[in-house]
Protein backbone atom coordinates (compact mmCIF):
# COMPACT_ATOMS: atom_id res chain seq x y z
CA UNK A 1 0.00 0.00 0.00
CA UNK A 2 1.31 3.43 -0.94
CA UNK A 3 2.35 5.44 2.10
CA UNK A 4 2.00 9.16 1.67
CA UNK A 5 -0.03 11.60 3.72
CA UNK A 6 0.17 15.35 3.22
CA UNK A 7 -2.35 18.12 2.67
CA UNK A 8 -1.22 21.73 2.35
CA UNK A 9 -4.15 23.32 0.51
CA UNK A 10 -7.87 23.02 -0.21
CA UNK A 11 -7.49 22.90 -3.99
CA UNK A 12 -4.32 21.00 -4.86
CA UNK A 13 -5.05 17.91 -7.00
CA UNK A 14 -6.67 15.33 -4.73
CA UNK A 15 -4.73 12.03 -4.58
CA UNK A 16 -6.12 10.14 -1.56
CA UNK A 17 -9.10 10.54 0.72
CA UNK A 18 -11.22 8.69 3.26
CA UNK A 19 -14.93 8.11 2.64
CA UNK A 20 -17.74 6.07 4.16
CA UNK A 21 -20.64 4.95 2.02
CA UNK A 22 -24.15 5.21 3.51
CA UNK A 23 -24.66 2.13 5.69
CA UNK A 24 -27.75 0.38 7.02
CA UNK A 25 -27.74 2.59 10.12
CA UNK A 26 -28.94 5.52 8.00
CA UNK A 27 -32.04 3.52 7.19
CA UNK A 28 -32.86 3.17 10.89
CA UNK A 29 -33.21 6.87 11.71
CA UNK A 30 -36.77 7.57 12.86
CA UNK A 31 -38.44 11.00 13.06
CA UNK A 32 -38.52 11.16 16.85
CA UNK A 33 -34.74 10.52 17.04
CA UNK A 34 -33.63 12.37 13.91
CA UNK A 35 -32.46 15.54 15.65
CA UNK A 36 -30.77 13.59 18.46
CA UNK A 37 -28.77 11.91 15.70
CA UNK A 38 -28.14 15.33 14.05
CA UNK A 39 -30.48 14.76 11.11
CA UNK A 40 -33.25 17.13 10.04
CA UNK A 41 -35.22 14.42 8.27
CA UNK A 42 -35.30 10.71 7.57
CA UNK A 43 -33.78 9.57 4.28
CA UNK A 44 -34.51 6.78 1.80
CA UNK A 45 -31.39 4.64 2.02
CA UNK A 46 -31.57 2.78 -1.31
CA UNK A 47 -32.07 6.00 -3.26
CA UNK A 48 -29.22 7.66 -1.38
CA UNK A 49 -26.92 4.73 -2.10
CA UNK A 50 -27.77 3.67 -5.64
CA UNK A 51 -28.95 6.87 -7.27
CA UNK A 52 -26.74 9.43 -5.54
CA UNK A 53 -23.73 8.37 -3.48
CA UNK A 54 -22.62 5.76 -6.02
CA UNK A 55 -22.06 8.57 -8.53
CA UNK A 56 -19.87 10.28 -5.95
CA UNK A 57 -17.73 7.15 -5.52
CA UNK A 58 -17.51 6.51 -9.26
CA UNK A 59 -16.47 10.10 -9.93
CA UNK A 60 -13.80 9.91 -7.22
CA UNK A 61 -12.45 6.66 -8.68
CA UNK A 62 -12.16 8.06 -12.21
CA UNK A 63 -10.20 11.03 -10.86
CA UNK A 64 -8.06 9.30 -8.24
CA UNK A 65 -7.82 5.61 -9.18
CA UNK A 66 -9.20 5.01 -12.70
CA UNK A 67 -7.68 1.53 -13.00
CA UNK A 68 -10.29 0.32 -10.50
CA UNK A 69 -13.24 1.36 -12.65
CA UNK A 70 -12.39 2.26 -16.25
CA UNK A 71 -13.44 -0.52 -18.62
CA UNK A 72 -15.61 -2.12 -15.94
CA UNK A 73 -18.49 0.34 -15.79
CA UNK A 74 -20.99 -1.85 -17.68
CA UNK A 75 -20.12 -4.84 -15.48
CA UNK A 76 -20.44 -2.77 -12.31
CA UNK A 77 -23.80 -1.28 -13.27
CA UNK A 78 -25.18 -4.67 -14.33
CA UNK A 79 -24.45 -6.25 -10.93
CA UNK A 80 -27.64 -5.81 -8.89
CA UNK A 81 -25.92 -7.21 -5.78
CA UNK A 82 -23.60 -4.19 -5.88
CA UNK A 83 -20.61 -6.27 -4.75
CA UNK A 84 -18.25 -3.66 -6.18
CA UNK A 85 -19.29 -1.20 -3.47
CA UNK A 86 -19.30 -3.56 -0.46
CA UNK A 87 -16.08 -3.58 1.61
CA UNK A 88 -16.84 -7.08 2.90
CA UNK A 89 -17.09 -8.49 -0.66
CA UNK A 90 -14.16 -10.13 -2.51
CA UNK A 91 -15.28 -8.05 -5.53
CA UNK A 92 -14.96 -4.74 -3.66
CA UNK A 93 -12.95 -2.11 -5.56
CA UNK A 94 -10.48 -1.83 -2.65
CA UNK A 95 -8.77 1.32 -3.76
CA UNK A 96 -5.79 2.66 -1.86
CA UNK A 97 -6.71 6.14 -3.05
CA UNK A 98 -10.48 6.25 -2.51
CA UNK A 99 -10.39 4.57 0.88
CA UNK A 100 -13.44 3.26 2.70
CA UNK A 101 -13.00 3.64 6.47
CA UNK A 102 -15.07 0.49 7.11
CA UNK A 103 -12.39 -1.47 5.29
CA UNK A 104 -9.63 0.13 7.39
CA UNK A 105 -11.56 -0.67 10.57
CA UNK A 106 -11.96 -4.32 9.53
CA UNK A 107 -8.23 -4.60 8.84
CA UNK A 108 -7.40 -3.12 12.24
CA UNK A 109 -9.77 -5.62 13.89
CA UNK A 110 -7.74 -8.51 12.48
CA UNK A 111 -5.34 -7.84 15.36
CA UNK A 112 -6.73 -9.76 18.34
CA UNK A 113 -5.38 -7.35 20.96
CA UNK A 114 -6.81 -4.29 19.20
CA UNK A 115 -10.09 -6.15 18.63
CA UNK A 116 -10.45 -6.93 22.34
CA UNK A 117 -9.64 -3.38 23.40
CA UNK A 118 -11.91 -1.69 20.88
CA UNK A 119 -14.88 -3.97 21.49
CA UNK A 120 -14.53 -3.40 25.23
CA UNK A 121 -14.35 0.37 24.69
CA UNK A 122 -17.43 0.43 22.43
CA UNK A 123 -19.38 -1.80 24.81
CA UNK A 124 -18.52 0.52 27.70
CA UNK A 125 -19.71 3.57 25.75
CA UNK A 126 -22.88 1.79 24.62
CA UNK A 127 -23.58 0.07 27.98
CA UNK A 128 -23.58 -3.44 26.52
CA UNK A 129 -23.72 -6.59 28.58
CA UNK A 130 -20.72 -8.87 29.01
CA UNK A 131 -22.52 -11.53 26.94
CA UNK A 132 -22.87 -9.10 24.00
CA UNK A 133 -19.21 -8.21 24.31
CA UNK A 134 -18.23 -11.87 24.00
CA UNK A 135 -20.55 -12.33 21.04
CA UNK A 136 -18.98 -9.40 19.22
CA UNK A 137 -15.48 -10.74 19.79
CA UNK A 138 -16.41 -13.89 17.86
CA UNK A 139 -17.57 -12.10 14.70
CA UNK A 140 -15.33 -12.11 11.61
CA UNK A 141 -13.54 -8.78 11.26
CA UNK A 142 -15.58 -7.64 8.26
CA UNK A 143 -18.87 -8.32 10.06
CA UNK A 144 -17.62 -6.82 13.31
CA UNK A 145 -16.65 -3.61 11.51
CA UNK A 146 -20.15 -3.38 10.00
CA UNK A 147 -21.76 -3.97 13.39
CA UNK A 148 -19.64 -1.40 15.20
CA UNK A 149 -20.62 1.19 12.59
CA UNK A 150 -24.27 0.38 11.93
CA UNK A 151 -25.20 -1.04 15.34
CA UNK A 152 -26.78 -4.06 13.63
CA UNK A 153 -25.58 -7.64 13.95
CA UNK A 154 -25.34 -10.06 11.00
CA UNK A 155 -28.57 -11.56 12.38
CA UNK A 156 -30.28 -8.15 11.88
CA UNK A 157 -30.54 -7.42 15.59
CA UNK A 158 -29.97 -3.83 16.71
CA UNK A 159 -27.39 -3.78 19.51
CA UNK A 160 -26.93 -0.04 19.78
CA UNK A 161 -27.73 3.19 17.98
CA UNK A 162 -26.44 3.81 14.45
CA UNK A 163 -23.91 6.53 13.74
CA UNK A 164 -25.49 8.00 10.62
CA UNK A 165 -23.11 10.99 10.52
CA UNK A 166 -20.20 8.68 9.72
CA UNK A 167 -20.70 9.47 6.02
CA UNK A 168 -19.30 12.92 6.84
CA UNK A 169 -15.69 11.76 7.15
CA UNK A 170 -14.42 15.37 7.06
CA UNK A 171 -15.32 15.63 10.73
CA UNK A 172 -13.25 12.69 11.98
CA UNK A 173 -9.88 14.32 11.40
CA UNK A 174 -7.92 16.87 9.38
CA UNK A 175 -4.57 16.47 7.62
CA UNK A 176 -2.38 19.50 8.29
CA UNK A 177 0.73 19.20 6.13
CA UNK A 178 2.08 15.83 7.31
CA UNK A 179 0.27 15.88 10.66
CA UNK A 180 -3.16 14.56 11.58
CA UNK A 181 -5.45 16.47 13.94
CA UNK A 182 -8.11 14.27 15.53
CA UNK A 183 -11.56 15.64 16.21
CA UNK A 184 -13.49 15.85 19.47
CA UNK A 185 -17.18 15.76 18.52
CA UNK A 186 -19.56 18.11 20.25
CA UNK A 187 -22.55 15.78 20.21
CA UNK A 188 -22.96 12.46 22.02
CA UNK A 189 -24.33 10.93 18.80
CA UNK A 190 -20.82 11.09 17.31
CA UNK A 191 -18.86 9.62 20.22
CA UNK A 192 -18.55 6.13 18.75
CA UNK A 193 -17.34 7.27 15.34
CA UNK A 194 -14.56 9.30 16.99
CA UNK A 195 -13.57 6.25 19.07
CA UNK A 196 -13.51 3.92 16.04
CA UNK A 197 -11.35 6.31 14.03
CA UNK A 198 -8.99 6.90 16.92
CA UNK A 199 -8.18 3.18 16.81
CA UNK A 200 -7.82 3.27 13.01
CA UNK A 201 -5.50 6.28 12.99
CA UNK A 202 -3.23 4.90 15.70
CA UNK A 203 -3.16 1.30 14.49
CA UNK A 204 -3.61 1.00 10.73
CA UNK A 205 -0.47 0.71 8.62
CA UNK A 206 -1.61 3.43 6.24
CA UNK A 207 -0.95 5.97 9.01
CA UNK A 208 2.29 4.39 10.20
CA UNK A 209 4.52 7.07 8.69
CA UNK A 210 2.75 9.81 10.70
CA UNK A 211 2.12 7.80 13.86
CA UNK A 212 4.17 10.31 15.83
CA UNK A 213 2.46 13.22 14.08
CA UNK A 214 -1.05 12.60 15.36
CA UNK A 215 -2.37 15.44 17.50
CA UNK A 216 -5.13 14.92 20.04
CA UNK A 217 -6.82 17.85 21.73
CA UNK A 218 -6.61 17.68 25.53
CA UNK A 219 -9.67 18.23 27.67
CA UNK A 220 -9.80 20.99 30.23
CA UNK A 221 -8.44 19.26 33.31
CA UNK A 222 -10.80 21.26 35.53
CA UNK A 223 -13.92 20.78 33.42
CA UNK A 224 -15.32 17.83 35.36
CA UNK A 225 -15.34 19.95 38.54
CA UNK A 226 -17.48 22.68 37.02
CA UNK A 227 -21.28 22.93 37.19
CA UNK A 228 -22.94 21.87 33.93
CA UNK A 229 -24.17 25.39 33.18
CA UNK A 230 -20.59 26.72 33.23
CA UNK A 231 -18.94 24.08 31.05
CA UNK A 232 -19.78 25.40 27.59
CA UNK A 233 -17.01 28.03 27.47
CA UNK A 234 -14.26 25.70 28.65
CA UNK A 235 -15.12 22.42 26.94
CA UNK A 236 -12.82 21.16 24.16
CA UNK A 237 -14.87 20.19 21.10
CA UNK A 238 -13.75 20.40 17.50
CA UNK A 239 -15.04 18.93 14.24
CA UNK A 240 -13.23 18.75 10.92
CA UNK A 241 -15.78 20.82 9.03
CA UNK A 242 -14.45 23.75 11.05
CA UNK A 243 -10.83 23.27 9.99
CA UNK A 244 -9.36 24.21 6.61
CA UNK A 245 -5.77 23.81 5.51
CA UNK A 246 -5.72 26.70 3.03
CA UNK A 247 -1.96 27.00 2.51
CA UNK A 248 1.20 25.27 3.82
CA UNK A 249 1.66 28.02 6.40
CA UNK A 250 -1.97 28.86 7.16
CA UNK A 251 -4.80 27.05 8.94
CA UNK A 252 -8.38 28.25 9.43
CA UNK A 253 -10.45 27.15 12.45
CA UNK A 254 -14.13 27.91 12.74
CA UNK A 255 -15.71 28.76 16.08
CA UNK A 256 -19.20 27.43 15.69
CA UNK A 257 -22.02 25.39 17.13
CA UNK A 258 -19.64 22.41 17.14
CA UNK A 259 -16.15 23.88 17.76
CA UNK A 260 -15.24 25.87 20.87
CA UNK A 261 -12.74 28.63 21.54
CA UNK A 262 -11.10 26.42 24.16
CA UNK A 263 -10.44 23.69 21.58
CA UNK A 264 -9.10 26.24 19.10
CA UNK A 265 -6.73 27.57 21.77
CA UNK A 266 -5.35 24.06 22.35
CA UNK A 267 -4.82 23.59 18.61
CA UNK A 268 -3.03 26.94 18.28
CA UNK A 269 -0.66 26.07 21.11
CA UNK A 270 0.08 22.59 19.75
CA UNK A 271 0.66 23.64 16.14
CA UNK A 272 2.82 26.65 17.02
CA UNK A 273 4.85 24.62 19.49
CA UNK A 274 5.57 22.00 16.82
CA UNK A 275 6.21 24.71 14.20
CA UNK A 276 3.64 23.18 11.81
CA UNK A 277 2.11 26.43 10.54
CA UNK A 278 2.96 30.13 10.82
CA UNK A 279 -0.53 31.54 11.23
CA UNK A 280 -3.94 30.37 12.37
CA UNK A 281 -7.09 32.35 11.70
CA UNK A 282 -10.21 31.87 13.79
CA UNK A 283 -13.50 32.49 11.99
CA UNK A 284 -16.39 32.80 14.42
CA UNK A 285 -19.75 32.16 12.79
CA UNK A 286 -23.19 32.40 14.41
CA UNK A 287 -24.05 29.35 16.50
CA UNK A 288 -27.00 28.39 14.38
CA UNK A 289 -28.04 25.05 12.94
CA UNK A 290 -28.19 26.75 9.53
CA UNK A 291 -24.40 27.07 9.50
CA UNK A 292 -23.03 24.28 11.72
CA UNK A 293 -19.41 24.47 10.39
CA UNK A 294 -17.41 27.04 8.42
CA UNK A 295 -17.40 24.73 5.39
CA UNK A 296 -21.16 25.25 5.11
CA UNK A 297 -20.48 29.00 4.82
CA UNK A 298 -17.53 29.01 2.40
CA UNK A 299 -15.18 26.69 0.51
CA UNK A 300 -12.42 27.21 -2.04
CA UNK A 301 -12.78 26.49 -5.77
CA UNK A 302 -9.47 27.73 -7.17
CA UNK A 303 -6.55 29.63 -5.70
CA UNK A 304 -8.36 32.82 -6.67
CA UNK A 305 -12.05 31.75 -6.47
CA UNK A 306 -14.20 31.10 -3.41
CA UNK A 307 -17.88 30.29 -2.92
CA UNK A 308 -19.54 31.83 0.14
CA UNK A 309 -22.76 32.90 1.81
CA UNK A 310 -23.45 36.55 1.07
CA UNK A 311 -25.46 37.21 4.24
CA UNK A 312 -22.22 36.72 6.21
CA UNK A 313 -20.15 38.62 3.66
CA UNK A 314 -18.78 42.13 3.39
CA UNK A 315 -21.74 43.91 1.81
CA UNK A 316 -24.29 42.54 4.29
CA UNK A 317 -22.05 43.37 7.26
CA UNK A 318 -21.38 46.91 6.04
CA UNK A 319 -25.09 47.54 5.51
CA UNK A 320 -25.81 46.27 9.01
CA UNK A 321 -23.10 48.53 10.49
CA UNK A 322 -24.68 51.59 8.82
CA UNK A 323 -28.07 50.88 10.39
CA UNK A 324 -26.48 50.19 13.81
CA UNK A 325 -24.57 53.49 13.71
CA UNK A 326 -27.75 55.30 12.73
CA UNK A 327 -29.50 53.81 15.74
CA UNK A 328 -32.11 52.14 13.55
CA UNK A 329 -31.28 48.60 14.73
CA UNK A 330 -29.37 47.09 17.63
CA UNK A 331 -26.12 45.28 17.13
CA UNK A 332 -26.44 41.50 17.38
CA UNK A 333 -22.99 40.57 18.62
CA UNK A 334 -23.81 36.89 19.03
CA UNK A 335 -24.88 36.61 15.40
CA UNK A 336 -21.92 38.44 13.91
CA UNK A 337 -19.13 36.85 11.94
CA UNK A 338 -15.81 37.76 13.54
CA UNK A 339 -12.28 36.99 12.36
CA UNK A 340 -9.08 37.06 14.39
CA UNK A 341 -5.66 35.95 13.21
CA UNK A 342 -2.76 34.61 15.29
CA UNK A 343 0.84 34.50 14.07
CA UNK A 344 3.54 32.43 15.66
CA UNK A 345 5.97 35.36 15.73
CA UNK A 346 3.46 38.11 16.64
CA UNK A 347 2.76 39.36 20.15
CA UNK A 348 -0.80 40.41 19.46
CA UNK A 349 -3.53 38.88 17.29
CA UNK A 350 -4.93 40.78 14.33
CA UNK A 351 -8.60 41.46 13.64
CA UNK A 352 -9.88 41.14 10.06
CA UNK A 353 -13.16 42.88 9.39
CA UNK A 354 -14.69 40.96 6.52
CA UNK A 355 -14.73 37.40 5.22
CA UNK A 356 -13.88 38.48 1.67
CA UNK A 357 -10.84 40.34 3.03
CA UNK A 358 -9.56 37.17 4.69
CA UNK A 359 -10.13 35.02 1.60
CA UNK A 360 -8.48 37.62 -0.63
CA UNK A 361 -5.43 37.70 1.66
CA UNK A 362 -5.16 33.91 1.46
CA UNK A 363 -5.32 33.97 -2.34
CA UNK A 364 -2.82 36.83 -2.68
CA UNK A 365 -0.40 36.48 0.23
CA UNK A 366 -0.41 32.69 0.70
CA UNK A 367 -1.15 31.39 -2.81
CA UNK A 368 0.46 34.00 -5.07
CA UNK A 369 -2.59 35.38 -6.89
CA UNK A 370 -2.97 38.94 -8.11
CA UNK A 371 -5.48 40.97 -6.05
CA UNK A 372 -7.64 41.87 -9.05
CA UNK A 373 -7.91 38.18 -10.01
CA UNK A 374 -9.64 37.12 -6.78
CA UNK A 375 -13.32 36.38 -7.38
CA UNK A 376 -16.30 35.29 -5.29
CA UNK A 377 -19.29 33.14 -6.11
CA UNK A 378 -22.19 33.83 -3.75
CA UNK A 379 -24.73 31.26 -2.66
CA UNK A 380 -27.96 31.70 -4.61
CA UNK A 381 -26.16 34.33 -6.71
CA UNK A 382 -26.72 36.59 -3.69
CA UNK A 383 -30.42 36.89 -4.55
CA UNK A 384 -33.10 36.79 -1.87
CA UNK A 385 -34.33 34.25 -0.80
CA UNK A 386 -32.07 31.90 -2.77
CA UNK A 387 -28.85 32.68 -0.90
CA UNK A 388 -30.07 31.19 2.37
CA UNK A 389 -32.19 28.50 0.70
CA UNK A 390 -29.30 27.13 -1.32
CA UNK A 391 -26.79 27.44 1.52
CA UNK A 392 -29.13 25.15 3.50
CA UNK A 393 -28.69 22.55 0.73
CA UNK A 394 -24.90 22.93 0.68
CA UNK A 395 -24.27 25.38 -2.15
CA UNK A 396 -21.13 26.50 -0.29
CA UNK A 397 -19.95 22.99 0.59
CA UNK A 398 -17.89 21.94 -2.43
CA UNK A 399 -15.01 19.50 -2.78
CA UNK A 400 -12.20 20.47 -5.17
CA UNK A 401 -10.97 17.36 -7.00
CA UNK A 402 -8.32 19.55 -8.59
CA UNK A 403 -7.99 23.29 -8.90
CA UNK A 404 -11.13 24.60 -10.60
CA UNK A 405 -12.92 21.23 -10.78
CA UNK A 406 -15.44 20.85 -7.98
CA UNK A 407 -18.24 18.46 -7.15
CA UNK A 408 -21.47 19.64 -5.52
CA UNK A 409 -25.20 19.08 -5.46
CA UNK A 410 -27.39 19.48 -8.54
CA UNK A 411 -30.19 21.42 -6.86
CA UNK A 412 -28.66 24.85 -6.24
CA UNK A 413 -29.64 26.50 -9.50
CA UNK A 414 -28.93 30.14 -8.70
CA UNK A 415 -25.46 29.33 -7.35
CA UNK A 416 -24.79 27.37 -10.52
CA UNK A 417 -25.79 30.42 -12.58
CA UNK A 418 -23.12 32.39 -10.75
CA UNK A 419 -20.52 29.74 -11.57
CA UNK A 420 -21.51 29.75 -15.24
CA UNK A 421 -21.15 33.54 -15.29
CA UNK A 422 -17.49 33.02 -14.38
CA UNK A 423 -17.03 30.61 -17.28
CA UNK A 424 -17.56 27.29 -15.50
CA UNK A 425 -19.02 24.32 -17.35
CA UNK A 426 -21.69 22.30 -15.54
CA UNK A 427 -22.05 18.57 -16.16
CA UNK A 428 -24.06 15.85 -14.44
CA UNK A 429 -21.93 13.22 -12.70
CA UNK A 430 -23.73 10.43 -14.60
CA UNK A 431 -22.93 12.06 -17.96
CA UNK A 432 -19.33 12.78 -17.00
CA UNK A 433 -18.75 9.16 -15.99
CA UNK A 434 -19.94 8.00 -19.42
CA UNK A 435 -17.63 10.56 -21.04
CA UNK A 436 -14.70 9.20 -19.03
CA UNK A 437 -15.58 5.60 -19.85
CA UNK A 438 -15.79 6.32 -23.58
CA UNK A 439 -12.55 8.30 -23.55
CA UNK A 440 -14.22 11.48 -24.82
CA UNK A 441 -13.12 13.28 -21.65
CA UNK A 442 -10.20 12.84 -19.29
CA UNK A 443 -9.85 14.10 -15.70
CA UNK A 444 -6.37 15.33 -16.59
CA UNK A 445 -7.69 17.84 -19.12
CA UNK A 446 -10.65 19.22 -17.20
CA UNK A 447 -10.71 22.85 -16.13
CA UNK A 448 -13.31 25.17 -14.58
CA UNK A 449 -16.00 22.51 -14.17
CA UNK A 450 -18.84 22.03 -11.70
CA UNK A 451 -19.78 18.34 -11.45
CA UNK A 452 -23.44 17.95 -10.47
CA UNK A 453 -24.15 15.18 -7.97
CA UNK A 454 -27.76 13.91 -7.59
CA UNK A 455 -28.92 15.09 -4.20
CA UNK A 456 -32.57 14.52 -3.35
CA UNK A 457 -31.71 12.32 -0.35
CA UNK A 458 -28.08 13.27 0.34
CA UNK A 459 -28.96 16.94 0.79
CA UNK A 460 -31.46 16.03 3.51
CA UNK A 461 -28.58 14.71 5.60
CA UNK A 462 -27.26 18.31 5.86
CA UNK A 463 -23.80 17.79 4.43
CA UNK A 464 -22.25 18.20 0.99
CA UNK A 465 -19.31 16.76 -0.91
CA UNK A 466 -16.79 18.65 1.23
CA UNK A 467 -18.29 17.09 4.36
CA UNK A 468 -18.27 13.61 2.78
CA UNK A 469 -14.49 13.58 2.30
CA UNK A 470 -11.38 13.51 4.43
CA UNK A 471 -8.42 14.27 2.13
CA UNK A 472 -5.16 12.73 3.30
CA UNK A 473 -3.06 13.57 0.24
CA UNK A 474 -3.15 16.49 -2.17
CA UNK A 475 -0.50 17.62 -4.61
CA UNK A 476 1.33 20.75 -3.55
CA UNK A 477 1.57 23.86 -5.69
Image (cartoon, helix red, strand yellow):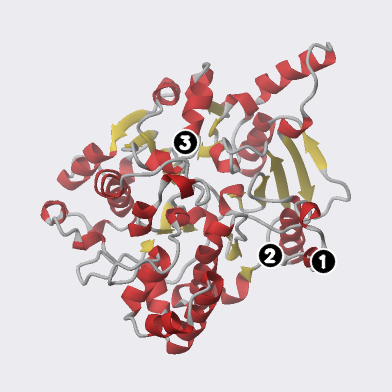
**Residue 105 percent location from the top left of the image:** 41, 72
Q: Which residue has dot 3 on it?
A: 394
Query: Height in image: 87 above or below 440?
Result: below
Q: Is residue 228 left or right of residue 130?
A: right
The earlier-in-sequence mark between 1 and 3 is: 1
- How crowded pointer 2 is (Cα within 10 Å; few <14, some 14-19, many 20+) is rated as some
Q: Is residue 471 left or right of residue 246?
A: left
Q: Which residue has dot 1 on it?
A: 225
Give the SS element for disc 2. Answer: loop
Q: From the image, state whether disc 1 or disc 3 is nearer to you.
A: 1
Give the SS element for disc 1. Answer: helix
The earlier-in-sequence mark between 2 and 3 is: 2
The earlier-in-sequence mark between 1 and 2 is: 2
- How crowded pointer 1 is (Cα within 10 Å; few <14, some 14-19, many 20+) is rated as few
Indicate the quadrant containing the N terminus: top left, top right, bottom left or bottom right: bottom left
Q: Which residue has dot 2 on it?
A: 217
**Residue 277 percent location from the top left of the image:** 69, 57
How many angstroms separate mark 1 from mark 2 (CA)? 19 Å
How many angstroms separate mark 2 from mark 3 (CA)? 28 Å
Amino acid sequence: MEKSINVSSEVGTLKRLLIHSPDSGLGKVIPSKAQDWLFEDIVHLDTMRKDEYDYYVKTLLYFLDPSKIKGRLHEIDADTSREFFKPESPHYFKSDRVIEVQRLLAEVLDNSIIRTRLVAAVCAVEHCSFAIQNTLLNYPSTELAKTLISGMTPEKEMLFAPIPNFIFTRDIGITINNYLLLNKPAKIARTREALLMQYVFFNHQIFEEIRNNIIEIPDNEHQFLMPDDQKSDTIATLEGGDVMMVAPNHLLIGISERTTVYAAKQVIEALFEKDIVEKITLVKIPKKRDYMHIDTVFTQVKRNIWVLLGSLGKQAKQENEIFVKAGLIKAKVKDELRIIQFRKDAKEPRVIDYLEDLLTEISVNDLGCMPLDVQFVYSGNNEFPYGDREQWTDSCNLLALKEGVVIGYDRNDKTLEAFKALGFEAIKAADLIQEFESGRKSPDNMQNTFILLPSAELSRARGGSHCMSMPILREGF
